[in-house]
Image (spheres, helix red, strand yellow):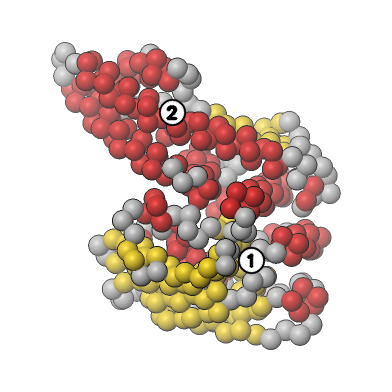
Amino acid sequence: MILKKITLTNFRNYKMETLELGSGIHFIIGSNGEGKTNFLESIYVLALAKSYKTSDQVLIKHQAEFAKIEATVFENNRLYDLSMIITEDGKNALVNKVQQKRLSDYIGKLKIVSFLPEDMNLIKGSPRDRRYFFDVYLGQMNRNYLNDLSKYKYVLKQRNELLKKMSKSAHPDELLLDVITSQLANAALPIIESRKQFIEQVNHFLKNRYSMFSSKNEPFEIKYLPSVEEPVETFFKSKYKSDIFSNTTNYGPHRDDYEFFLNDVLAKNYASQGEQRTMILTLDMAMAEMMKQMHNENPVILLDDVFSELDYDKQNKLIQYLHTMQAQSIITTTSIHEISNNVLKEALVYRVTNGAIKEEKHNG
Ligand SMILES: Nc1ncnc2c1ncn2[C@@H]1O[C@H](COP(=O)(O)OP(=O)(O)OP(=O)(O)O)[C@@H](O)[C@H]1O
Ligand SMILES: [Mg+2]
């Protein structure tokens, strides 16, 4: 999958910029605050219909009324146009100029894998960070997943409203709670099953991969921790008391978690900064390989500021890896001094200055 051309209108600090891209490695260089992350974020938003950072409105350039991201994508020998328009009132996704009814059907049209500074929270941060991370990839790879998730959220909201009412009533009616709990269990099952299968596959791809960016070949594994036990409905019912007491559903996929193990110990407690970064990078590349195997096309790989934290050897391993994978990759960095001329010769290099992007020639 290749982004051939992208046009940003009123997106963050970009007024109107069009960029033609190649099929290999791209470097976006610029000083702090010039718009490197914003550029990657625009591709992220085009792919996933929302930012990882913020609410939609913040994406609109100051004083503008809308933001627009348009791109021509090449996939399976076909060209098609994607656009995302963000206004004060909401957003619209279009494929070949046709408005998409449901964003959950749109997501996955442009497949991406991203390495973001925010991802450094993945291992030691909150369960929400980890659920979000895996949902992003599950959502892109599994057509039904996002629909399952929105059905679940809908029932969950209803159940929480009922629990609120029940906690205020002197004689709460458990009959209605039974009905909605059974609906919740039905909605939870496909999500739990998808997550379980997904992590099994991820682990398969992670086997022996940690050494890709590390001199040690330590086993790296992820464990899925569903918050409910099976049978799910019975489990939900055994928690009525605490749910009514706290006016909320305390168990279910919205409380699931994942644990990361490096060398058979819990990374959350032991892994160093550098080890965490290596794990996340390894995981991202596993995602890319999974996508490639499933869809026969590489995703677009976005790497924000990954180099500033990697030593020379790891930088080269990463570049080498991207090169062999032949995926379109877009890498932001404040400086390319440390990148070898051999790599630069084959890459496209762009410089961002205050929301304007210009290609630079590097002949090695
Ligand atoms: N909605 C917006 N409208 C106008 N400008 C914005 C908007 N949102 C962010 N900016 C500006 O964009 C700039 C930040 O851009 P960005 O985060 O892409 O920088 P960067 O090149 O990645 O820098 P760094 O090297 O520090 O990561 C800031 O100056 C910020 O004020
Ligand atoms: Mg940045």
Q: Distance of mark 2 from mark 1, alpha carbons?
A: 36 Å
User: Does label 1 point to a residue whose CB lies under 8 Å from ligand 2?
Assistant: no
Query: Does residue 305 lie above or below 167 as drawn?
Result: below
Disc 2 marks a residue whose amino acid type is Leu
Other-residue count near label 1 (Cα within 10 Å), few / some / many at <14 / 14–19 / ≥20: many
Disc 1 marks a residue whose amino acid type is Ser
Query: Does residue 3 lie above or below 275 as drawn?
Result: below
Specify which label sits upstream in the sequence, 2 or 1.
2
Q: Is residue 153 left or right of residue 269?
A: left
Q: Mark 1 points at which residue?
A: 329
The x and y percentages for residue 181 are 31, 22
Query: Does residue 10 lie above or below 277 as drawn?
Result: below
Question: Which part of the image, by quadrant, shows the N terminus?
Answer: bottom right
Question: Which part of the image, by quadrant, shows the C terminus?
Answer: bottom right
Q: Is residue 38 left or right of residue 312?
A: left
Would you identify the image quadrant in which residue 265 lies? top right
Is any part of residue 362 visible from this angle?
yes
Is any part of residue 354 visible from this angle?
no
Q: In this view, does 254 lie to the left or right of 40?
A: left
Q: Residue at x 51, y 70 (%)?
A: 79
Other-residue count near label 2 (Cα within 10 Å), few / some / many at <14 / 14–19 / ≥20: some
Element class at badge 1: strand
Element class at badge 2: helix
Picture disc at residue 28: none
Q: Residue at x 45, y 42 (%)?
A: 145
Q: Which residue is drawn at 36% across and 35% down?
A: 152
Q: Name the residue under label 2.
A: 189
